[in-house]
Image (cartoon, helix red, strand yellow):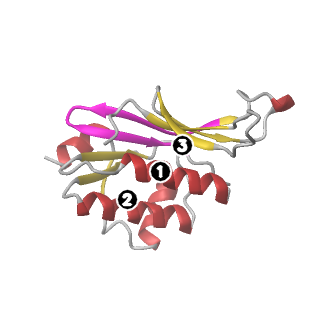
Amino acid sequence: MRAAGHSVTREEKNGSDGASPSLFFARPALLWSNCAGAGGDPQAMQTELLKVSNLQSATVVELFLPDDLDSAEFDRLNEGLAAIFTDQPNARWILDLTEVEYMGSAALGLMVNIRHRVKTMEGRLALCHMSTKLHQIFKACCLERLFTITRTRDDAVKAMR
């Protein structure tokens, strides 16, 4: 079980063992992705993909998905979210989508998988701060029927009582 305030991060290992990029848990609650940056500076190359925090009785997962998330980054995001949403029966979850403008089919499928994982553990899930564009995508795919969608985090907490 992962405590809120911990996260999955991605870091390129530069050791002599030739290890590939790995996931590990650290503070603060962020999942990082390598992106093109100026001069190869590792700090300039990292983009935050998610942040985990607590709000009252719920765990908030704030997503920061770029429109052009590549397959390797998506796989790592999928693994990180799977780790966060594991073994927490009866938990209350809020997915904050403030920074998400677009989701392709893979990301939409990931959302359905998260919903299934939460329901299997008899938890509750609400989405909040969804942009108009993203809400239209959810409607076009008939996904608004599957999710509790609210305007704010506080509304999401109230909807899960």
Label 1, residues with CA under 10 Å away: few <14, some 14-19, many ≥20? some
Q: Earlier in the sequence, mark 3 or mark 1?
A: 3
Give the residue at mark 1.
131
Report the predominant secondary structure element of the magenta stretch: strand
Question: In the image shown, does 83 or 77 lie closer to the viewer?
Answer: 83
Left or right of 74? Residue 139 is left
Between marks 3 and 1 in the image, the one whose residue lies nearer the viewer? 3
Residue 2 position (above or below residue 67) = above
Residue shown at the point (20%, 51%) measured from the top left: 89
Residue shown at the point (79%, 35%) measured from the top left: 37
Q: What is the quadrant of residue 58 in the picture?
A: top left
Image mark for residue 64: 3
Query: Residue 18 at x, y = what percent?
Result: 75, 42
Label 3, residues with CA under 10 Å away: few <14, some 14-19, many ≥20? many
Which element type, helix, strand or loop, lies under badge 1?
Answer: loop
Give the residue at mark 2.
114
Specify the segment rendered in magenta: 47-64
